[in-house]
Image (cartoon, helix red, strand yellow):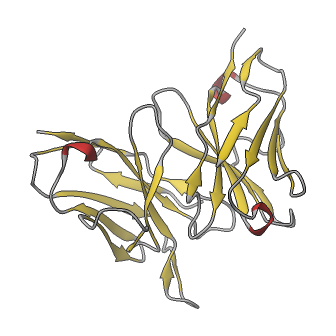
Amino acid sequence: QLVESGGGLVKPGGSLRLSCSASGFTFSDYYMSWIRQAPGKGLEWVSYISSSSTYINYADSVKGRFTISRDNAKKSLYLLMNSLRVEDTAVYYCARDGVAAADFWGQGTLVTVSS
Amino acid sequence: DIVMTQSPDSLAVSLGERATINCKSSQSVLFSSNNKNYLAWYQQKPGQPPKLLIYWASTRRSGVPDRFSGSGSGTDFTLTISSLQAEDVAIYYCLQYYSTRGYTFGQGTKLEIK
């Protein structure tokens, strides 16, 4: 199970930290990803992190503003989002990269960036 | 960056008929060292997160009905639903996970009943 939290309403230029709590599998064995979906729009991959945090990558749209991290002891994945823009408004999903990318998803948490 | 283009954007098919969704990548997603296509298909129903259906372009995930199948290699891929059921109404996405620079989704195909 993957459970996201930390979403909410934030003003443009603000910051927010999302969390994803994992259970039911060996969290430290898997790459993890954040994927978002703007209201009524398609899916956009945001970032991934390797099992030991060695490899990290970001979509160009968030590079330099978002930071992905994980704590394997706490079985948790994080996304620190700075300098938020209106266009960052979306449901943010955490997903496990297992047999393929994003083989298992959480229910998502809504981030709304608005003044 | 690899661009994924799905066609059509929307599709209406009669119950029991075949539905076909295409996905084209701007460059090959076939990894030569293991001969695997890094291409997956997802189904998303309203108000739900996406669900993985197919990976390695043609491997059906455990528990997915066998009316769903994936085919193709290199840059051209197809998701086929052999006999459409009412519960298959959804938006379908392809995803490339080949690039180390990051993953890319297609824009989605909305499947409805005719």
Front one among A26 and A58: A26
- Give the residue at x 77% y 14%: A11
Asked if residue B32 can be seen in this view, the reply is yes
Q: How far across and down, in percent of the image, does residue B106 sit?
A: 44, 52
Residue at 67%, 29% in the rendered image? A88
Work out which residue is located at the far top of the displayed protein and give it. Answer: A115
Q: Residue furthest bottom?
A: B33
The correct choice, above or below, for A87 with respect to B51 in the image is: above
Question: Left of A58 or right of it: where is A13?
Answer: right
Q: Is residue A7 above or below residue B53?
A: above
Tell me what residue is drawn at x 81 percent, y 48 percent: A76
- Answer yes or no: is residue B26 visible: no
| Residue A99 coordinates in the image, percent (x, y) | 57, 70
In percent of the image, x 82 and y 53: which residue is there?
Answer: A75
Q: Where A25 falls versus A94 (above or below)?
A: below
Q: Position of residue B86 (x, y in %)?
A: 20, 43
**Quarter that holds the C terminus of chain B:** top left
Q: Give the side of residue A24 with respect to residue B35, left or right.
A: right
Left or right? Give the position of A105 relative to B73. Answer: right
Question: Looking at the figure, which quarter contains the N terminus of chain B?
Answer: bottom right
Measured as percent of width and height from the top left, residue B28 is found at: 48, 74
Q: Is residue B14 above or below residue A73?
A: above
Total labels drawn: 0
The one of B29 and B43 positioned closer to us in this rendering: B43
